[in-house]
Amino acid sequence: MGRRAFLAVVGLGGLGLALGSRIARPLEAVLPGQGWRIYAINPPWPHFDPATWRLEVTGAVEHPLSLTWDEFQALPNHRQTTTFHCVTGWTVDDVRWQGPTLQTLWDAAKPTKQAKFANFVSYERPYVDTLTMEQTTLPNVILAHSMDDAPLSRAHGGPVRLVIPQMYGYKNVKWLRRIELVPTLEPGFWEQNGYDVDAWVGRSNGY
Ligand SMILES: Nc1nc2c(c(=O)[nH]1)N[C@H]1C(S)=C(S)[C@@H](COP(=O)(O)O)O[C@H]1N2
Ligand SMILES: [Mo]
């Protein structure tokens, strides 16, 4: 099913019933200037409280992590300038991102042999998406807390979102809450609605 058809279904409330959740319709807002569109499946956008926020790494790891905001900010930063592509056709060039690589987290959490996939779970339920463990350590795959030299805004998934420039926007999970390492593939939110699991820019979803 195409995105347009899916959004129509959501607009009619079918998905909300199917999932038993509060989903009514996705929110899309266009910010002036840069070509970004702001997506959310279940508004209102999650609120960030630095006192209670955690980033968890769970599942097939020797050392589960539950990082506070201070601990997360203390991780080594990777800086990059990369292009962001949504599968629906819009692109934002030269986005400056900063944040730790996934390898930094794996060094601390120590994935076990059972860890084959990483599920990135959003504070915005039920948004989730997945990468293979190999994909998590591709160049410029980071957990971004800064965009264009400012703290990542709430609209763009602040305080922390996944950034994987090699893949379409839907893999770049906003309002990240937990990373769960698992042995088998569990398709993400948009994949359950017809999008490719491997979202390589230029090679997936019929492009
Ligand atoms: N939690 C969450 N993450 C999400 C989405 C969403 O609806 N909810 N949409 C995805 C899609 S399809 C795209 S193109 C990008 C858009 O990023 P932006 O809202 O910062 O422009 O976020 C991705 N991450
Ligand atoms: Mo997207």
Image: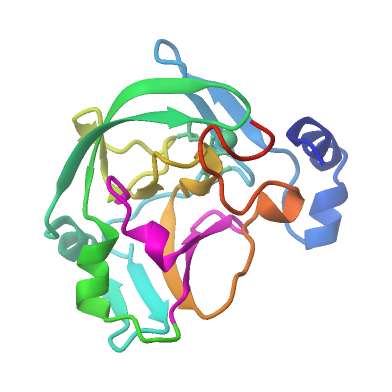
Left or right of residue 180, residue 184 in this image: right
Q: Is residue 101 above or below residue 87?
A: below
Q: Position of residue 183 (x, y in %)?
A: 52, 81
**Residue extent of the magenta highlight:** 115-142
- Quadrant position of ligand 2: top right
Q: Look at the image and tell me in which quarter the C terminus lies.
A: top right
Q: How is the image coloured?
A: rainbow
Left or right of residue 1, residue 113 in this image: left
Left or right of residue 18, residue 206 in this image: left
Q: Position of residue 21 (x, y in %)?
A: 74, 59
Q: Is residue 127 shown in magenta?
A: yes
Q: Is residue 68 visible in this depiction of the protein?
A: no
Q: Quadrant of residue 104?
A: bottom left
Q: Is residue 71 above or below residue 73?
A: below
Residue at the front extreme of this rendering: 203
Q: Quadrant of residue 70?
A: bottom left
At a point 23% along the width and 60% down the height, the residue shown is: 69
Q: Is residue 136 visible in this depiction of the protein?
A: yes
At a point 47% along the width and 22% down the height, the residue shown is: 91
At a point 43% along the width and 49% down the height, the residue shown is: 47
Q: Look at the image and tell me in which quarter the N terminus lies.
A: top right
Q: Is residue 69 shown in magenta?
A: no
Q: Is residue 111 above or below residue 154?
A: below
Q: Nearer the viewer, residue 82 or 173?
A: 82
Q: Position of residue 64 (x, y in %)?
A: 32, 83
